[in-house]
Image (spheres, coloured by chain):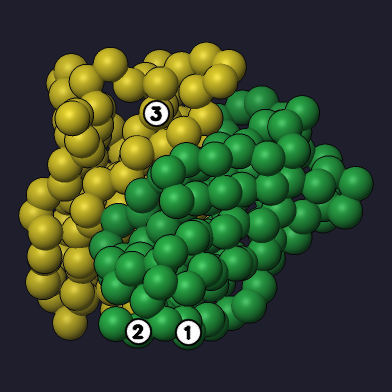
Amino acid sequence: SQQGEEDPQALSIQEGENATMNCSYKTSINNLQWYRQNSGRGLVHLILIRSNEREKHSGRLRVTLDTSKKSSSLLITASRAADTASYFCAPLSGAGSYQLTFGKGTKLSVIP
Amino acid sequence: EPEVTQTPSHQVTQMGQEVILRCVPISNHLYFYWYRQILGQKVEFLVSFYNNEISEKSEIFDDQFSVERPDGSNFTLKIRSTKLEDSAMYFCASRLQGRGQETQYFGPGTRLLVL
């Protein structure tokens, strides 16, 4: 596995606005996952996008993947205070046990 | 919806003591993991476990650590002689086997404090 680098490190928006966070990685992947962590709690899987996909939606989430630029973005539309959390990307390549390597994440604050 | 559970939620121990952290993965999952997160730092991979043996482990997972699946439901992490720097949140995760089953499901964590 490899570590993704999330950007920005912190993001503060008003409720109702959209939030965009980015992820870059270094080597080719099979898929890329996004996880959310509420303060000090367990990680929750949000969405997985495969290397042959360019865009994927799940509810208010939209993920894009650009394998030529080795980057992904996560868009949360119509944000809510409950979206306040840290968001992590996890690029996965190869086979094996698929252990995840997390970066520092993007800390999103949604202000009511 | 099935979920990964972990016990205890909090554990306080004295330096040098042994601790066992317990996890019950989702019942039909076959891959199990332990991660840890020191306060304010990244979530770090410790070990993965499949078919009753360790499949991969990180540099953090030294001889002080061991994992076991003592029965058909529990998955444990043992720290033999705890150090102050073992204080962290420990997360268990599990997933299904096979291609297309890369999603991991995390438990709520055990907060370990070593004094």
Query: Are callouts 1 and 2 both on one chain?
Result: yes
Residue B98, above or below A19: above
- The chain holding disc 1 is A
Chain letter tied to yellow: B
Query: Are callouts 3 and 1 both on one chain?
Result: no
Chain A painted colour: green
Horizontal and vertical percent position of residue A23: 68, 61
Within 10 Å of the Cα at label 1, are there few (<14), some (14-19), or many (20+) other Cα atoms?
A: few
Horizontal and vertical percent position of residue A21: 61, 67
The residue shown at (64%, 42%) is A32
Distance between the Cα atoms at labels 3 and 1?
33 Å
Q: Quadrant of the N terminus of chain B?
A: top left
Within 10 Å of the Cα at label 2, are there few (<14), some (14-19), or many (20+) other Cα atoms?
A: some
Within 10 Å of the Cα at label 3, are there few (<14), some (14-19), or many (20+) other Cα atoms?
A: many
Query: Disc 3 designates what residue?
Result: B95
Q: Amino acid at mark 1?
A: Ser
The residue shown at (35%, 38%) is B105
- The chain holding disc 2 is A
* Residue B9 visible somewhere in the drawing: yes
Q: Amino acid at mark 3?
A: Arg
Q: Is residue A70 left or right of residue A68?
A: left
Quadrant position of residue A36? bottom left
Residue A18, above or below B8: below
Query: Disc 2 designates what residue?
Result: A111
The residue shown at (61%, 38%) is A56
Task: In this rendered view, identify the residue nearer to me: A86 or B112.
Answer: A86
Query: Disc 1 designates what residue?
Result: A12
Task: In this rendered view, identify the residue nearer to me: A18 or A101.
Answer: A18
- The chain holding disc 3 is B
